[in-house]
Image (tube, helix red, strand yellow):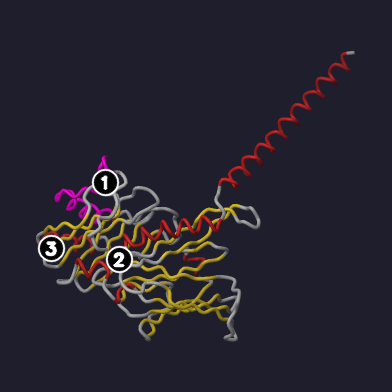
Amino acid sequence: MKKIVLSCVIALLCMFVAYQSFGQKTQGKTSKATSEQKLPVCEDAIAAAKKLNQTQADAECRTVHQCVPCQDKKTNKATCKSVTVQPTCGTAATITKDEAKDASGKNQKALPFFAEIIQSPCGNGKVSLEAVVVQDGQASFDKKSQQAYSFKWTVDGKDAGTDSEVSCIQAKEASVKVTKKNADATITLYIKPLTEVSNTAASMAPVPTVAAIYKKTGCFGLCPIYEVQFFVDGRVKWNGKMNVGTLGIKDATVDRETIAQIARTADRIKFFNMDRRYPDYQVWDAPSTVIYLNMNGKEHQVENILDAPAELKELERIFDDIIKKNGWRTSPDKANQSAQSVPDAKN
């Protein structure tokens, strides 16, 4: 009798464990399915992202790139699609032509990769261009991944290097030929950079030369978007674009010692030897801090999204102190948390 009771208890326990295990698996599948169903269809998500990104691209006068989470309509699987929006400020700032060819020079209808050009303005009407490889709908900024590709830039008909990017150039037209080494597949992209008409420099820096620029870029929230330009004669221009307490353009001055301090600090922390972008991989929906310097015959720009050298904070503190001393508010006022660009503040 005891054996029968024990056997029944064991059987009941096994049934309970099996039921719990099945319930957990079912719940896991349901949760996963639910999370996937919550994602919008890729076509709709991309269209919405392009519209939203265009506002940010025009406010910052730079390319805005994002990987949009969505659900593939055919497979019903969650994925992430690369979306790049070019700004409309300045003149024709869009890719005007692209070519896809194989090793024999014939046009290909399908390639194992695609590429996009991302542009960001430097000072004095110059722009930096970066060729980004896109595979399976996602862009890669990782330098190790990019080693599988070769790059060849041409700026106004002249060779401009074989790196994935060209920094702080001024040109009417630029192109980059991107080749996947193991597939012998080539894409050539053409672009008319923003510098044909100096974007922010056209309204903020006619004369004299810009010595430094300090700016914050946006995100898909209320991240502050502003730019401060420092001129060699000591003039300073604040441009509060979005999500800041001080909107629009404000003027101020700094003494020559402040400009000299910026130059000394840059040399000491080896700013001109730093990478142009930190990190070298994409961080989705993240604001960045951009510092551009044109001093003592040296010109360089660094964009800090994440993991930049700690020494870079020394330069950022100098700029932050100047902003505070002039009373420019970098956070949106509580009464206007959804602050937008000032209509007459040119980008």
Circle 1 packing at 10 Å, graded few (<14), some (14-19), many (20+), is: some
Q: Give the camera-side residue of 235 and 305.
A: 235
Residue 167 lies, in percent from the top left, at 34, 72
Most common secondary structure along the magenta stretch: helix
- Of badges 2 and 1, nearer the viewer stands 1
Q: Quadrant of residue 87?
A: bottom left
Q: How far apart are marks 2 and 1 (CA)?
A: 24 Å
- For the record, the magenta segment spans 313-336
Label 1 sits on residue: 331
Label 2 sits on residue: 301
Please identify the quadrant where the C terminus is shown. Answer: bottom left
Q: Distance between the residues labelled 3 and 1?
A: 23 Å
Q: Which numbered circle lies on residue 303?
A: none
Q: Is mark 1 on a helix, strand or loop?
A: loop
Residue 191 lies, in percent from the top left, at 40, 76
Please identify the quadrant where the N terminus is shown. Answer: top right
Residues marked 2 and 3 touching at CB (< 8 Å): no
